[in-house]
Image: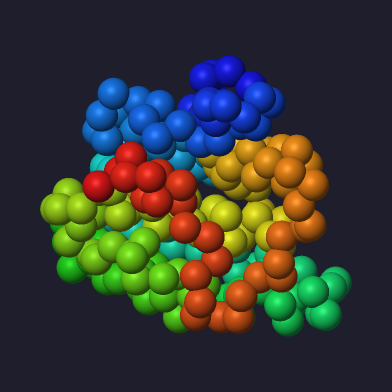
Amino acid sequence: MSQQGGYRRRPGTPGLPVRSIRPFKSSEQYLEAMKEDLAEWLRDLYGLDIDAANFLQVLETGLVLCQHANNVTEAALAFLAEAPVQAQRIPMPRTGVSCNGAAQPRTFQARDNVSNFIQWCRKEMGIQEVLMFETEDLVLRKNVKNVVLCLLELGRRAWRFGVAAPTLVHLEEEIDEELRHELALPPPDPPPPPGEPLYMPSAVLHGQVV
């Protein structure tokens, strides 16, 4: 595999691809690329007029976030009904999120929607704190990085019970599968119990987003 796709071969190990430590010139460029991927994902899921430029504006009322949380919950409950044994091994939500559909940007209602989504991510999806964000991080743009990382982690977890995932999640899975194949590694371990980390984004591990 060449440097295309954000990873390269390990020096001295022919044929073995690993994630590049710096596929982008800066963490800002990497963050922008993740925003573009998430925007495309949400656009495909919900028909939104969203891109990297207006990504935060579209999300700041919390309406899209709550809608997605409730759709993920529906998918999880359907998965539970179809595969109860498998479902016991996967952190998954059992309840949805209440949402004020009339919320306007930077109002109490918007903050309440975002807060409800955040609590759902913590309690129902078990997303670890290092990937979580706070209400003001989105509403006042205080910590865009963690907004992006939280949504990516949610995409990874929800994919396990049938919800479409961002392209970056698919790419990570393809890289991991190729590594397992070339190294003749066994399949990945079962998911950890609720509350334990499911997957730490390679961008965080390698210092691409700081």
In the rendered image, residue 99, in percent from the top left (x then y), is placed at: 40, 69
Looking at the rendered image, the quarter that the N terminus falls into is: top right
Between 91 and 55, which is closer to the camera in this rendering? 91
Name the residue: 73% across, 81% down: 88
> How many labels sit on residues?
0
In the rendered image, residue 120, in percent from the top left (x then y), is placed at: 44, 74
Between 145 and 203, which is closer to the camera in this rendering? 203
Residue 70 in sight here: no
Between 80 and 105, which is closer to the camera in this rendering? 80
Residue 149 in sight here: yes
Name the residue: 30% across, 55% down: 146
Q: Is residue 67 above or below residue 94?
A: above
Q: Is residue 161 above or below residue 169?
A: below
Left or right: residue 4 compared with residue 189: left
Name the residue: 51% across, 36% down: 19
Left or right: residue 175 compared with residue 70: right
In the rendered image, residue 158, in percent from the top left (x then y), is placed at: 61, 60
Name the residue: 75% across, 38% down: 182
